[in-house]
Image: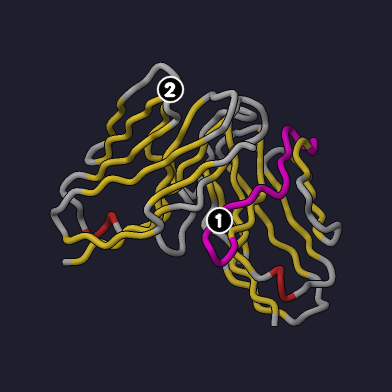
Amino acid sequence: KNQVEQSPQSLIILEGKNCTLQCNYTVSPFSNLRWYKQDTGRGPVSLTIMTFSENTKSNGRYTATLDADTKQSSLHITASQLSDSASYICVVSRGDYKLSFGAGTTVTVRA
Amino acid sequence: DTAVSQTPKYLVTQMGNDKSIKCEQNLGHDTMYWYKQDSKKFLKIMFSYNNKELIINETVPNRFSPKSPDKAHLNLHINSLELGDSAVYFCASSLGTYTGELFFGEGSRLTVL
């Protein structure tokens, strides 16, 4: 079964601190993995895309990693800001019409 | 200039009523989608259209009927609304059919009383 598991379900961090979100998947075959950020009351927005050959990709203070052998990805947020408070969703593509979504990690950044 | 726009943003209605949600994208994408996000924030695909043709139709009650008059529009009509239909419905589009980045609308929150 093609599944995407994200952890933790939620976390609270202080402004300026770093945090790491995890995404484990059993999707096969693998085409790409995207991290989306969903602000409260808004639609998800893509942060990064990782293909099979990529290990690390950065988008500002967001850095995604991928280990295709262990089928794990992480999203690291550096020097968190209040605007980072959102849900982060991991989405894995098989290359066909099926996308597998994780349930998301809710991040709350406190001043 | 909004890329994917859906209306209305909020819908409050009684059980048994019929309602529609409209979606338009100005990105020139070929593929459009409807997703349902439940209270646990989990996004679930409902339908996908590619160039006005239905390509994904997940296990959704036939009370839900999508309609794509052209590739820039994908509307969702829901008949005989039930309490369990309460959710946020997201329209999305992508350039590629299956591996492209999804561009989401702002969502339409449906509350069935």
| Helix, strand or loop status at disc 2 | loop
In this rendering, the answer to whether A76 lies above or below B98 is below
What residue lies at 83% left-to-right and 67% top-to-bottom? B79
On what subunit does the disc labeled 1 rest?
B
What residue lies at 67% left-to-right and 32% top-to-bottom? A97
To the question of a shared chain for discs 2 and 1, the answer is no
Q: Position of residue B96 (x, y in %)?
A: 60, 27
Question: Residue reaching furthest front?
Answer: A70
| Helix, strand or loop status at disc 1 | loop
Magenta residues span: B38-54
Q: Which mark is residue A69?
A: 2
Question: Residue reaching furthest top?
Answer: A53
Quadrant including the C terminus of chain B: bottom right
Quarter of the figure with residue B38: bottom right
Query: Alpha carbon of mark 2 to alpha carbon of mark 1: how far?
Result: 26 Å
Decide: few, some or many residues near mark 1? Use Cα within 10 Å; few <14, some 14-19, many ≥20. Answer: some
What residue lies at 38% left-to-right and 39% top-to-bottom? A47
